Image (cartoon, rainbow, N blue to C red):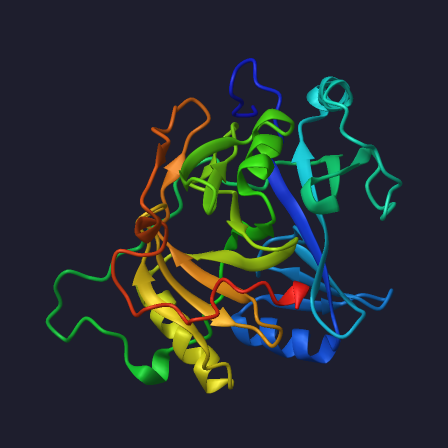
Amino acid sequence: MNKKRKNQLAIHSICEFVFSVPDLQQAYDFYNAFGLEVKNSSEGYLELYTYGCAHRWARIYQDGDKKQLKWLSFGIYAEDFEAIQQHIISKNIPMIAALDDQAKQSFWIEGPDSLPLQIMVTDKVSPDFKSQAIHPLTESLVGRAPNRKLITQVNPGYLSHLSIFATDVEATVSFYVNVLGLRISDQSRGIVAFLHGAHGSDHHLLAIAKSNGSGLHHSSWNVDRIDDVGMGKQQMEQAGYDQGWGMGRHVLGSNYFHYVRDPWGSYAEYSHDIDFVAHDHDWPAADHPVEDSMFVWGPNPPKDFIINYETI
């Protein structure tokens, strides 16, 4: 049975994010090293999966001379399809031609900064429960840390959230709240906002950061152990991806993190133990000082951490 917030029309998941890069081999190498299952499509694009999960989280096309976020796909429950479509029409949101014909029951709208958004009927893939947090052993007669020879590749379990850029954070928040039914978790007003799914999700399903245009800042992938954050950082450094931020801990969301810089100036994040907002819980949303939008502890972020390289 679906866990649904009563009397709330809303998307329930980010089903897929789609972007393009200049070189697909670079993308394959990066995400394969990161620990995702990267598949070559017969149609010439890459597909991103997490191991052991049949859901496709992303597609990557080859195009242009820099990375570009192409569109986002959001999931809704089948019983809400007509009501959500009529709700969006009533808000005078422009409908646009489909950019992809793989979904049988979907429609397309123009989002903030003209970002195309697909609204589609699909199973919920955002979590219904707090993510697992497997803690290190508290005692042992032989030592509690794993031997280095026993370390295997870190493989994230699911896509926790996306962070996107927007020219007007408050207007973009208003769109996702009033049109698509997301709810504010926390924010530093006008600079960054964190939105969760009304039907249950991690502390943020979507983060929105101030910029001069649309773009993808980072994708965040859940891991079950804090050691996985550190070992993920190590495996990426060994693969040649030694630029990023972390490890550290966020204030908003509470998760432990390490961000790995990709070849195009954006990031993939290992995230552990993020807060969860259940479908029947009213999160105490607040407007926080900007310093709390970054981290409790950890190294200072790179000077260009919030630069949108898609608009340069």
> In the image, 45: left or right of 37?
right
Q: Could you say which quadrant of the image residue 7 lies in?
A: top right
Q: Could you say which quadrant of the image residue 299 lies in?
A: bottom left
Q: Is residue 276 above or below residue 54?
A: above
Question: On the rendered image, what quadrant is the C terminus found in?
Answer: bottom right
Residue 13 placed where, x, y %?
Answer: 60, 39
Query: Which residue is depicted at the point 33% across and 41% down?
Result: 288
Residue 22 placed where, x, y %?
Answer: 75, 75
Q: Is residue 199 above or below residue 14?
A: above
Residue nearer the viewer, 224 or 292: 292
Residue 231 placed where, x, y %?
Answer: 37, 73
Query: Which residue is depicted at the point 61% across and 48% down?
Result: 167
Query: Which residue is depicted at the point 51% across and 28% down?
Result: 198
Residue nearer the viewer, 49 or 288: 288
Residue 277 visible: yes
Question: On the rendered image, what quadrant is the N terminus found in?
Answer: top right
